Image (cartoon, grey):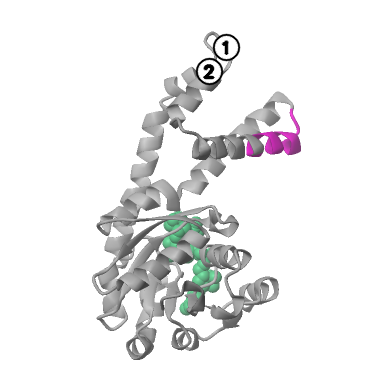
Amino acid sequence: MSKADSVTLAFIGAGNMAGSIIGGLVQTGWPAEQIIAAEPSNTKLDVLAETLGIRTTNNNEDAVAAADIVVLAVKPQIMKSVVEPLAASFQEHKPLIVSVAAGIPENSLNQWAGGNMAIVRCMPNTPSLVQLGASGLYANALVSDEQKSVTEQIMDAVGISKWVESEAGIDDVIALAGSAPAYFFLMMEAMIEAGEKMGVSKEAASELVIQTALGAATMAKESDVDVAELKRRVMSPGGTTEQAIFSFEDSGIRTMVDKAMNACRNRAEEMADAFKD
Ligand SMILES: NC(=O)C1=CN([C@@H]2O[C@H](COP(=O)(O)OP(=O)(O)OC[C@H]3O[C@@H](n4cnc5c(N)ncnc54)[C@H](O)[C@@H]3O)[C@@H](O)[C@H]2O)C=CC1
Ligand SMILES: O=C(O)[C@@H]1CCC=N1
């Protein structure tokens, strides 16, 4: 498993998140024939096979048998019922397990998979589809340096990744990155709606808002100065921007964001409690 693009990757569950990672990998040149997706939905599998050229199956066990790395990408609520029937296959083939599920602890996964499995918990996000993903990674003690390196190469092919020291760090990443694209989509949605109320067409407002979000994010990524300074540079004293920023601050945007991110993180902890057994 030293060369990342020589490993075979199996995705168990081929929905939004798996589809984003697979799409990002194939677009970046990852060999499609070394990716296999297992799913009950033929509609989803057919789209992936036709558009990306990956291999597909309805049989999770066949996918595990073919793989060096198995990415578990089903909903947390059904994770146990998906993993337990695969335990014999996991024990026979001993692939690296990478779970992208929110709130499912590594020790539960390990137990359901029959024990003694190398497991990485990965918290990605859907911008992986356009190679702009941001993911957190946590490895259990059985994951080798080589396996860590391959996992990192996979996630870096579709964006950036950061290792976290403790498993609790994955819940921080859920609030900061996994769930976070939705916060920015919400902000864009609200801005487009406000533009429409001003009389701008939805199309024009969407184009302006999305381009501005892209420009701001690109500047923030490329700039030597922090985001607070970039914000200040738009705020001419006595000008228009500061009126908008004062209004956001008056309405308690920081408290709102802090509260929302903690609600997100707390839900990950609740899910761990609800689905760990
Ligand atoms: N959507 C997102 O932005 C993110 C999702 N995640 C995690 O990714 C996981 C999947 O989430 P989504 O992709 O959003 O959900 P999804 O519902 O789009 O995908 C799950 C897929 O699993 C399939 N599935 C159902 N039963 C199955 C079975 N027995 N065997 C194989 N596949 C089966 C479903 O048909 C579906 O296509 C979740 O655990 C979630 O916590 C993590 C980070 C971000
Ligand atoms: O909403 C969720 O539970 C998943 C995990 C992170 C993003 N979507």
**Residue drawn at 25 percent across, 71 percent down:** 107
Q: Is mark 2 within 8 Å of ligand 2?
A: no
SS type, badge 2: loop
Visible in this render: residue 77?
Answer: no
User: Which range is magenta?
Assistant: 200-210
What number is the disc on residue 141?
none
Visible in this render: residue 182?
Answer: yes
Whether 121 is drawn above or below 243: the answer is: below
- At label 2, the amino acid type is Met
| Residue 94: in magenta span | no
**Residue drawn at 40 percent across, 33 percent down:** 256
Q: Is residue 88 left or right of residue 200?
A: left
- At label 1, the amino acid type is Gly
Query: Where is mark 2, residue-wise?
Result: 235
| Quarter of the rendered image showing ligand 2 | bottom left
Query: Where is mark 1, residue-wise?
Result: 239
